[in-house]
Amino acid sequence: MGVGALLGSFAAYGLAGRFSPIRIATFSVLAATVPKWFLGLDLPAAGIVVVLAASSFWNPVGNAVMISLMTVRTPHALRAKVMTAVITFATIAGPIGLVLAG
């Protein structure tokens, strides 16, 4: 998973100037989700590693674009409050989602 995320970080830098940020964010969210469907199959350990690496490749791509958009589009006077609220909500919602999902 770490290698996939590291490669995704490099890809985010390369993709940023070539495509619209909204397209990159949309595609990366979908591309990070699709490989996880293969986890329902009876895969060997190497297959699971490949699926997770493929999924984790797209996480830094989407995160970089979405956080950049949120930062740039928020008025300067509200930026600190908005970023704090988003990070707080994500930090609280993550564990709640895991508990609810089982």
Image (cartoon, grey):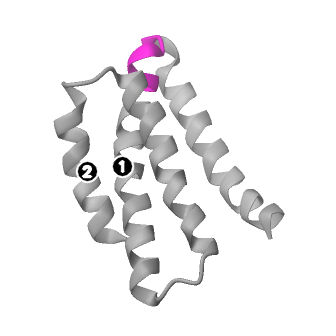
The quarter of the image holding the N terminus is bottom left
Report helix, strand or loop for mark 2: helix
Instruction: Determine contact: label 1, label 2, CB under 8 Å.
Output: yes
**Residue farthest to the bottom, as pictured:** 44
Where is residue 37 shown, x and y percent of the image? 59, 62
Residue at image point 69% right, 52% down = 92
Where is residue 28 shown, x and y percent of the image? 42, 41
Name the disc covering residue 90, or none: none
Lateral position of residue 86 relative to residue 12, left or right:
right
Residue at image point 53% right, 53% down = 34
Tell me, yes or no, whether the highlighted magenta stretch contains residue 14: no
Q: CA distance from mark 1 to mark 2?
A: 5 Å
Where is residue 81 shown, x and y percent of the image? 56, 27
Q: Amino acid at mark 2?
A: Ser
Give residue 96's quadrant in the image.
bottom right
Residue range highlighted in magenta: 69-76
78 lies above or below 39: above
Residue at image point 55% right, 36% down = 84
Q: Which residue is mark 2?
A: 9
Residue at image point 39% right, 85% down = 46
Which of 39/8 is in front?
A: 39
60 lies above or below 36: above
Name the disc covering residue 60, or none: 1
Report helix, strand or loop for mark 1: helix
**Neighbours of disc 1 within 10 Å: few (<14), some (14-19), many (20+):** many
| Marks 1 and 2, the one that precedes in the sequence | 2
Q: Amino acid at mark 1?
A: Pro
